[in-house]
Amino acid sequence: MGKGRISFTAVDGFGELDRSVRDYINKRATATYKQVESRVTTAVREKIRQHLFSSGTTQSILNGKLRSDFGLTYTAAQIAVNSIISHVIDNIKVSIKYSYKGANIAIFSLDLLPLGMDKLSQLPEGNYISSGKYGGGDVTWLTWLLTRGTTVVIGDFYVFEGISGTSRSNESVMQRGRSGFRVEPGFAGTENDNFVTRALDPIIPEIRDEVFKTFIEALT
């Protein structure tokens, strides 16, 4: 989905000092790489977990308009949110590459969701089979939320709210209508701009600082 790259640069790009600095960092970083990787990955995952859980979209899935619109029970919503967050934080790749050319000494790479949104949107917790007096079908609500934007995803139906005790969400039902159903614009997302990417983008500087801090601590 996204990649972050951080370069550590030598003070002097030429000569014996440069080679000495590179050799020193190479030896120290090699010896402590597993420690650095583990610490950075743990810190990054926790930051992402916190930001994803606290996002407005996540909270709406748990107990708001999205839960109602998608016809989710409280239990189904909680299970889905846990699965979404777990998938995101489990698909983070942190790597380090040593540089022997130019001024760069080492480059840390952070890859978030390297397989893109496909695997995330296809989580089994993100869909269910609906049935009712007008028929039924697959409700792939997570795919709608992550990739379909504000396009109509169900034609000839709309969400009728304020009905208690007659649906999975206990708050609303699908009714036949001309307008069709689409994800609420304030929550709607596309492949490259959705509630996951929007939750992660603001913390990229924090992640960069954490990587730099951990790398320096490992070398001192």
Image (spheres, helix red, strand yellow):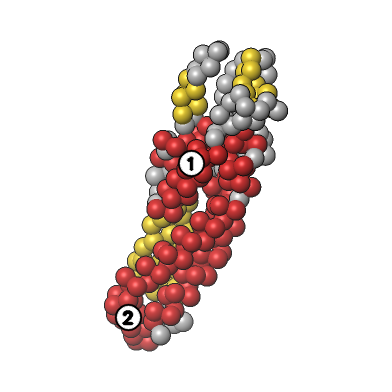
Q: Is residue 198 above or below residue 26?
A: above
In this view, the residue in front, 77 or 209, is 77
In the depicted view, which residue is nearer to us: 86 or 113? 86
- Residue furthest out toward the right: 162
Q: Position of residue 46 (x, y in %)?
A: 48, 61
Element under disc 1 = helix
Q: Residue at x 62, y 42 (%)?
A: 63
Q: Where is mark 1, residue-wise?
A: 80
Q: Nearer the viewer, residue 73 or 67?
A: 73
- Extreme-top residue of the structure: 134
Does residue 41 lie above or below 29 as drawn?
above
Amino acid found under the numbered disc labelled 1: Ala
Kindly tell me whether residue 166 is visible in this rendering.
Answer: yes
Q: Which residue is mark 2?
A: 28
- Dot 1, crowdedness within 10 Å: few (<14), some or many (≥20)? many
User: Looking at the image, is mark 1 or mark 2 earlier in the sequence?
Assistant: 2
Q: Secondary structure at mark 2?
A: helix
Where, quadrant-wise, is the C terminus in this rendering?
bottom left
What residue is at 43 percent from the left and 59 percent from the top?
A: 110
Cα–Cα gap, marks 1 and 2: 42 Å
Q: Position of residue 107 (x, y in %)?
A: 40, 67
Q: Residue at x 41, y 63 (%)?
A: 41
Q: Nearer the viewer, residue 142 or 9?
A: 142
Q: Position of residue 44 (x, y in %)?
A: 47, 62
